[in-house]
Image (cartoon, helix red, strand yellow):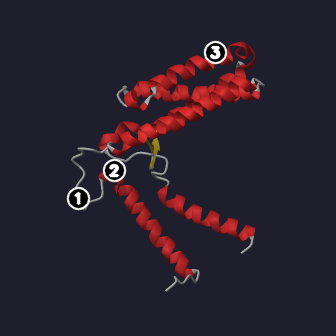
């Protein structure tokens, strides 16, 4: 199989997968009452509220950096340090979930803004502050991810909707859509002449 054919095959499988999972693919949370404030619904599509705020903050930050690129030149490193300091301290996973949802939205938007400022620093030739900022954000993300994992394992503890032998209501849509994908994928493989090893 040539490279072009492999790419086409990969794209076809990816398209089939996304055609089934797009309603929840970007939600990053269960679709239940407990997490209703953390997921936005846009028609049939559920999206992660925190990620949406990060992207919105990054987009707004990029626009502002473009519009005010000259005035920003002298203050960008200090502005980045202030924004990053506030964002990273208040976003520490131990207390981040205790903040009201509007404050979490603001912190996520500020994170997007700090990412945009890093890009501005790098693109404007301020290599050292830009690289240091990027390294700080990357290291914080890695460190916070480990702490968040521990909290994520306990996120559903005590939920009355959890019952032995039943799918959690927060994952019912996911389970049904993935079942449909598996059925169509199996039919496609068989139609293509695939024979499993004995």
**Label 2 residue SS:** helix
Circle nearer the N terminus (2, 1): 1
* In the foreground, 44 or 56: 56
Of badges 2 and 3, the one in the foreground is: 3
Residue shown at the point (42%, 38%) measured from the top left: 148
How many dots with numbers? 3
Residue shown at the point (64%, 63%) measured from the top left: 11
Circle nearer the N terminus (2, 3): 3
Q: Determine which quarter of the picture holds residue 63.
A: top right
- Where is 40 relative to 60, above or below? below
- Where is 50 relative to 188, above or below? above
> In x, y percent, where is residue 146?
46, 40
Circle nearer the N terminus (3, 1): 3
* In the foreground, 144 or 164: 144
- Residue 178 shown left or right of residue 73 in the figure: left
Q: Are marks 2 and 3 in contact (CB under 8 Å)?
A: no
> In x, y percent, where is residue 165?
25, 62
Q: Which residue is mark 1?
A: 164
> In x, y percent, where is residue 161?
24, 50
> In x, y percent, where is residue 135?
63, 32
Q: Which residue is mark 3?
A: 78
What numbered label is drawn on residue 170? 2
- Where is 113 relative to 74, above or below? below
**Label 1 residue SS:** loop
* In the foreground, 189 or 82: 82
The crowding category of the residue bearing disc 3, from other C-alpha atoms within 10 Å (few below 14, some 14 to 19, many at least 20), is few
- Where is 179 relative to 147, above or below? below
Using the numbered discs, state the Cα–Cα distance from disc 3 to disc 1 in whole angstroms.
53 Å
């Amino acid at each position: 199989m040539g490279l072009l054919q492999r790419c086409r095959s990969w794209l076809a499988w990816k398209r089939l997968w996304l055609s089934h999972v797009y309603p929840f693919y970007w939600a990053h949370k269960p679709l239940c009452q407990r997490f209703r404030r953390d997921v936005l619904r846009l028609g049939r599509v559920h999206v992660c509220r925190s990620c949406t705020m990060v992207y919105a903050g990054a987009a707004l930050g990029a626009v502002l950096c473009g519009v005010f690129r000259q005035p920003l030149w002298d203050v960008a490193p200090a502005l980045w340090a202030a924004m990053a300091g506030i964002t990273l301290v208040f976003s520490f996973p131990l207390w981040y979930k205790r903040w009201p949802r509007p404050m979490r939205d603001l912190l996520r938007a500020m994170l997007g803004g700090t990412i945009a400022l890093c890009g501005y620093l790098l693109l404007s030739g301020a290599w050292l502050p830009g690289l240091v900022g990027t390294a700080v954000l990357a290291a914080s993300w890695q460190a916070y991810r480990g702490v968040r994992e521990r909290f994520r394992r306990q996120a559903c503890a005590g939920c009355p909707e959890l019952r032995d032998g039943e799918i959690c209501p927060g994952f019912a849509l996911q389970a049904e859509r993935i079942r449909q994908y598996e059925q169509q994928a199996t039919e496609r493989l068989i139609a293509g002449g695939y024979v499993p090893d004995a």
